[in-house]
Image: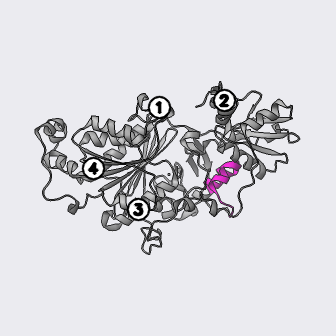
Amino acid sequence: MSVTITIPSALRQFAGGKSQFEVEAGTAGEAVNQLSTQFAELRHHLYDDKNKLRSFVNVYVNDEDIRHQSGAETPVKDGDTLMIVPSIAGGATAEADVAAELPSLSNEEIARYSRHLIMPEVGLEGQKRLKAASVLMIGTGGLGAPLGMYLAAAGVGRLGIIDFDVVESSNLQRQIIHGTKDIGRPKIESARDRLSDINPHIEIETHEARLTSDNALRFFQHYDIIVDGTDNFPTRYLVNDACVLTGKPNVYGSIFRFEGQASVFWAAARNGSGACYRCLYPEPTPPGLVPSCAEGGVLGVLPGIVGAIQANEAIKIILGAEGILVNRLLLFDAWAMKFRELKLRKDPQCPICGDSPTITELIDYEAFCGLSPNQQAEPPQLEEITATELKRRLDSGDDIQIIDVREPHEYEIARIPGTTLIPLGQVVVRMDEIDHSRETVCHCKAGVRSAKAIDALKRAGFPGRLTNLKGGITAWSDEVDASVPKY
């Protein structure tokens, strides 16, 4: 059977840069195995040491998750499409949450919301519901920026913002709630000023703090809806679990390069049959396996689109609309301008929302995601060198070859003199180009991908000495040569 396999952008670097492959297979497992056999590094990302698909990698045949069919033995037929969906971090609002006595609208508010009021799907009562509602936004970055602006413009009466970061110049390509004049300011201050300017009739509550297991339940209980605009896995699982424990809807969005995901995880919806984030991804991706937007980049308009979808879903929940993204995962490819929807199902074995939950309180999410130092019995053996020390040794005449594992378009932006470019996805197949008799220093933008390259080379049997440039080319610019651009 001829089957098309679609590769997400986060994994394409390990599949020759291609987005689709045609394979001959009779089952989903055969198809994925056949493809991964061609690309050793792709296989490492898809399968664990026991040759089982990793739990944070989902495979769909057309729009159905194979976990809810026959797993790897799920049959495929000519023309089927398999989608590899790795983690990247219905119904109405409870009537009791909306008091019988809804707030009134002033004449000024009626004029402001007139385009809503003339829609029968919103109308006067719907606009009053928006004014009575409260939404907590986790983050005011790429997703939180458009999300907050549209919720404020729509007239959501009380907006809460949690953030602890400051505005940087690199944020401005996509985080449209902030401006050049805000560089260096706390994001919640910049966001508060912008949202107040958009709509002075709403209440804005700012919480300059990191969301933790100690404060999440306290924050969440004061809001109707939680919207997840985070960019890391520990906080994503924390948001999910806190929403399940408090019964709140979790409006989810994630982005990477030009691809986005959106859903509404609401375990209490549909008579308790709503799926949560853990139903989709039971376990987190190991640290460093999925590149961040800082490493892989993100198309500036993408978070605007996904954030607007999140705002749309939050508004629909408040209005009690049909067609909310409960038990549905929306995939968006901005480059191909294509949407695709996949079905989700509640997992009866889910540890937080299943039939017999084992998680009944918030846990240590840094440890759960493998980011706690105490969770690593043996720290990874990785030799590192600082940019300052590397420059000193090069000036002293030490015989060191430097391998740049970034992508060619990054090499065009900035480079360290005398380096050899071998992108991460090619480093194993091209390791014969690396002289194993010389000491090798690998570098990338910040040190993460180069550490992956070293691990891949060691697993492939490279016999030479491998050292990671701590902080990558960014550290080189900071410590050695400021003329090298930072991006």
Q: Name the residue type under label 2.
A: Tyr
Give the mark toward the camera: 2 or 4: 2
SS at mark 1 in the image: loop
Could you tell which of marks 1 and 2 lies nearer the N-terminus?
Answer: 1
Q: Amino acid at mark 1?
A: Gln
Q: Main secondary structure of the magenta part?
A: helix
Viewer can see residue 14: no
Q: Please identify, in this view, whether the residue under mark 3 or under mark 2 is nearer the observer.
A: 3
Task: Identify residue for label 4.
Answer: 316
202 displayed left or right of 413: left
Say which residue appears at 19% left-offset and 40% top-offset.
116
Give residue 411's mark.
Answer: 2
Q: Earlier in the sequence, mark 3 or mark 1?
A: 1
Which residue is pictured at 12% across the width and 41% down the height?
Answer: 106
| Mark pair 4, 1: CA separation | 29 Å
| Callout 2: SS | helix
Which residues are drawn in magenta? 30-50
